Image: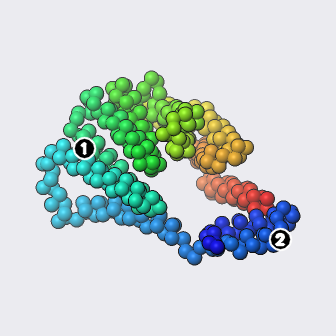
Amino acid sequence: MKKLDLTKQEKEVVEHALQHWKDQQLLDGAKADELRQNIDEKSFEWKTLARYAFWVALVSLVFSVFSLFADNVLVRFVERFYETPNIVFCVFFAGLAGLFYALGFRNKKRHPENTFSNETMMLAGSFSTAACIGFLGQVLDRNTSQYTLLFLLSIIIYAVLSVKLQSKLIWVFTLVALGIWFATETASHSNWGFKFWGMNYPLRFTLFGLLLTSFSIWAQPRFKPLQPFQSTSYVVGLLYTMIALWCLSIFGNYASFDAWTQVRQYHILYWGLLALVLSLSLALYGMKAKDYVSRDIGFVFFILNLYTRFVEYLWDNINRTIFFLILAVSFWFVGRWAEKIWSKGQSN
């Protein structure tokens, strides 16, 4: 009989569950021992190694590009291409993207178990697509109406590819491109100013994140091709909302840096309170509904907003020694509180 391969942590959880059911007389002792004998511990985490290896490969690729421009010999070689029309680079990266997507799709069809190598191909294709659209933007003038349409084009390309290839990674690129298009579209309608309809970028993206999160909860499940990406949209939407709201709590709804420096932070305290209330509400909802994504994001941004307010209002008003002492003690209490929650979960 083939045994069930589990990691050391997974094996401990299963054995703990079997012992609990045995102690509660929900499972016969002989059957529990039989099930325990059917568990085997993995000798090595090859999946984890594969994930890290592909990540290192991508990072190394990025560093190789930077090293290319740090090498004087290669710089002189690259300078020969400075006069090359941007349309040539656009076509080149379009072909490169098509090659990566074709290889990724073929490998995914033939070897669906090779998750990380397939996703690496998709990621390389996504970067090539972004480069292609970027060079196409150089061909077009930013002041023309076609400029923002480029980002809309990238959204369509990424969305079609993510559905066709069933790639959550490309769907993330779709949502990032959607955010870039939203920023450029609203900026173009305000003559590339900082405010649109009286809203600066943090306030705009707070509303944008709320709309994206709402779409992922109520509308996206109704579209069958988009259902596999519902959780991804939910996470990205929450991150858009909470990051933008955190920035809004710091800078307020001001149109310029100079205008922001002329006011005291307590003048925009209401944005900070809103960020604290929303993040805490998200964390409490996650705990009650067992939604671990919203719970974790809520707690992280609640603590981040709390310490941001702490730095804003106390940095210039108390002695530095007392400031860091309070900071150290507060972090100790946060750690102790987290330790108690973890210990309670372990005992349960």
Is the residue 190 above or below the residue 84 in the image? above
Amino acid identity at mark 2: Gly
Residue 32: quarter of image: bottom right
Inspect this view and state whether residue 214 appears.
no
Q: Position of residue 98 (x, y in %)?
A: 29, 50
Dot 1 surroundings within 10 Å: few (below 14), some, or many (20 or more)? some
Label 1 sits on a secondary structure element that is helix
Label 2 sits on a secondary structure element that is helix
Q: Nearer the viewer, residue 311 or 169?
A: 169
Instruction: From the image, tell me which residue sits under label 2.
Output: 29
Q: Nearer the viewer, residue 307 or 324?
A: 307
Q: How is the image coloured?
A: rainbow
Residue at left 36%, top 49%? 126
Instruction: From the image, tell me which residue sits under label 1.
Output: 135
Residue 181: quarter of image: top left
Q: Position of residue 215 (x, y in %)?
A: 54, 33
Is the residue 259 above or below the residue 51 in the image? above
Mark 1 to mark 2 CA distance (whole Å): 68 Å
Q: Quadrant where the N terminus lies?
A: bottom right
- Does 224 sit left or right of 310 as displayed? left
Amino acid identity at mark 1: Phe
In this view, the mark in front (1 or 2): 2
- Furthest residue in direction top, as rendered: 197
Q: Position of residue 31 (x, y in %)?
A: 79, 69
